[in-house]
Image: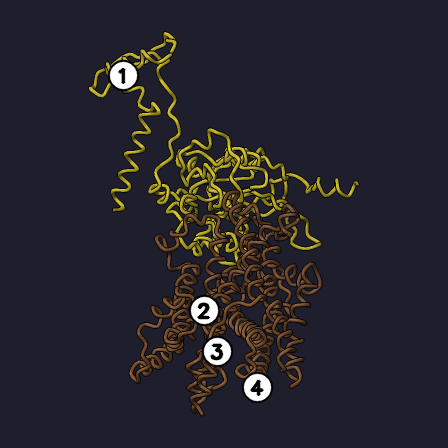
Chain colours: A yellow, B brown
Amino acid sequence: MKKSKTESTNNQDRREFLKKGLMASSLAASTSALLNFQNDDVEESGDTVELMSPEGEIVEVDKAYLKPIPDVPVDLQKAREGVPGRKFVMVIDLSRCKNLKKCQEACQKMHYLPPEKEWLKVLKMQDNDITSPYWQPTVCFHCDNPPCVKVCPVDATFKRSDGTVLIDTERCIGCRFCMVACPYSARTFDWSEPDQPEEVMEMEYSPETSCPAKMGTVSKCDFCPDMARKGELPHCVTACPNGVFYFGDENEDAVSNGDVTVKLSQLLKDKSGYRYMEDLGTKPRVYYLPPVNRLFPFEDEEASAEEGH
Amino acid sequence: MNQIENKQIQEELMPRKFGQAGKLWTILLVIVILLGGYFYVQQIQNGLSVTGLGDYNTWGIYISNFVFFVAISLVGSLISAILKLSNVKWQVPLTRISEMIAVAAIAFAAIVIIIDMGRPDRFMNVILKARIQSPITWDVIVITTYFFISIILLYLPLIPDLALMRDQDKGEKPWLKKLYRILALNWRGTELQGRILKKSVRILSVLIIPVAFGIHTVTSWLFATTFRPGWDSTNFGPYFVSGAFMVGAGAVICAMYVFRRQYGYEKYLTDDIFNKMGKLLVLLSLVYLYFNVNEYLAPAFKMKAHEVGHLNALFTGEFAPMFWSVQVLGMMVPIIVLLFPQGRKPLPMFIISILVILGAWFKRFLIVVPTLSHPLIPTEKLPQSALHYMPTFAELSITAATLAGALLIITVLARIFPVIPVMETIEENYE
């Protein structure tokens, strides 16, 4: 039963594949496809490339016929299993953060989030009156002992082999138990019909992209697994100009902030990495480096603006 | 002699057509339900955005109302199981009232939880994709079980009365007659039938007690299995169960008073029964008071960093007026008043029972809402509006409709079935 279901999704994917012109290059070899091309309103560029047809012949095709490969998300089965062999991990260096919120901007933009739906928050931390406050970018921690996954009654939120915790919003019943179970308040809810651009609405849904959003379901920071699958860094990591975020693979013991790639274990050792609310036993996959030897003095512009009034 | 008395008991206890007041009451309930239904349609169309809920206060009065319904439904097991098994004789006239309340409340507990769902269209996932490690799945299992046991426990002792109504030639509507005939299951009142019935009811009375503890303990675990301040407590199961018995007793006292006034049942729902229920309510309130002391004193003594905001909001802050009103009016005052024999007369008991029920409803609010207004993460940079929950009119209407719905079920049941068991009362009379 389960198998045939997967197969049918595969078939659908394949059809989608063809429709979207993914195989335009190889099709170019067959005559029928060429005939089709003549119907296409394409202006030949004169530049050609050599391609191999399904029959094994080398053919020359004008570059104008080539179409970019659209991003087709992996199927649900794969999205539930995770990227094989990986153990994704994040390190956030608090000594480099000055609350620029470029990370948040990128996250909102790339996931088409409205302003009130924040997957990435920059919290103002102050442990007590005497010690200095600091900024703490806070994402979903993709805990190894995830309270949210434990309480989900329908397996809509799940833990993958690569460490990420994702949500299948096509299964979520909207009970919001995971939201109260998460001690970090990482989860958001679509209280009304989400306002999304047309192209997002048309996207094929995958828990890996979290798009399109659906009314009455829970969502959260997903560690950008679609990017990770391609070997790229999450949007918050690349957007940060100060290199606050490191992302990588625990199995490879390597993390990168876009500028440098460092050994994870060494980084955590040298800079005394720790995890937020370690005492809860949730075992987050996000480590913090303490706000010592800071790059910037702490400044709370909003607060000082308020005082100025 | 007995024959005449029995006849009289029968006459007096038969269900009656609604009078002016009954009709008006029913119409009122239907209007409240229709208004709630209108807003629920809006909620289906526009999502839970019609409520005052948000990403921090993600549960509100739907959930606290759900806990209230589950709590009040425990009255069924209290009266018709715990009291029955402890050989308390005066509980007989209260069994049916308490089972009617239990069935109505547990049915609406289930409905309320569906109302709270973001995707009620995917309700079947709860069964088809069920994961046994989720406390919600436990709740679904145990509430369903309790619902069916409660229905059977309402129905079985009703069978002899149904036969009675089937056999009498009073001018009831034909469809009612037919209903009685079908439901009476060919009851002839033979000795064997009587024996089977007694035994079944006894088995169910034993069975329902662990299930009753189960529904409210599991409901408390929806909160206690999280890390949230005020919920992260090992005390929560017994705390919830004791509060449930207290409000259940309050509900049955309230219903007793209304039926006594409405039907003139002074002979059956005697002052003595009120007196005894009053004593029972004092006991249950004292147990609940004990758990309240446990629940608030120990955390308040420690004032852990995560709990400070929540505790201050309850004791002296935003929720303090509601908190102290509930603790004083909904618990202390009933205990004090009911300690005096004058306080255990029907009218003062009725007023006290209203206080207990209202107190219990707002107490559930105080358990659910202030906790979520105080998340574990620092709140300074969070949108402040998201940390203050105020239910919308739509949300209040829908909640009012569920309460009216439960009352309507009780009203309809009281219209078509005798609220005091006829045959059992006759039997009692012989003894």
Residues at discs 4 and 3 both on one chain: yes
Element type where label 2 sits in the image: helix
Mark 2 belongs to chain: B
Amino acid under label 3?
A: Leu
Mark 4 Cα within 10 Å, few/some/many (few <14, many 20+)?
some
Residue lying furthest right: A309
In front: mark 2 or mark 1? 2
Label 1 neighbourhood size at 10 Å, few (<14), some (14-19), many (20+)? few
**Disc 3: which residue:** B13
The residue that label 4 is drawn on is: B272
Question: Does label 4 or label 2 sit earlier along the sequence?
Answer: 4
Task: Provide residue B5's location: percent of width, then percent of height.
Answer: 46, 87
SS at mark 3 in the image? helix
Q: Looking at the picture, which amino acid does disc 4 mark?
A: Asp
Which residue appears farthest toward the top when viewing the image?
A: A46
Q: Check residue A33 in the rendering and tell me which mark sits there, or answer none.
A: 1
The Cα–Cα distance between marks 4 and 2, rounded to whole angstroms, is 27 Å
Q: Position of residue B76 (x, y in %)?
A: 47, 73
Q: Amino acid at mark 1?
A: Ala
Q: Nearer the viewer, mark 1 or mark 4?
A: 4
Residue B157 visible (yes or no) = no
User: Looking at the image, which is closer to me, B266 or A33?
Assistant: B266
Callout 3: residue from which chain? B
Q: Residues within 10 Å of mark 3 (few under 14, many from 20)?
A: many
Share a chain, discs 1 and 4? no
Chain letter for mark 1:
A
Judge from the rendering whether residue A298 lies leftward or rightward of residue B133; answer left or right.
right
Q: Residue at x 58, y 62 (%)?
A: B24
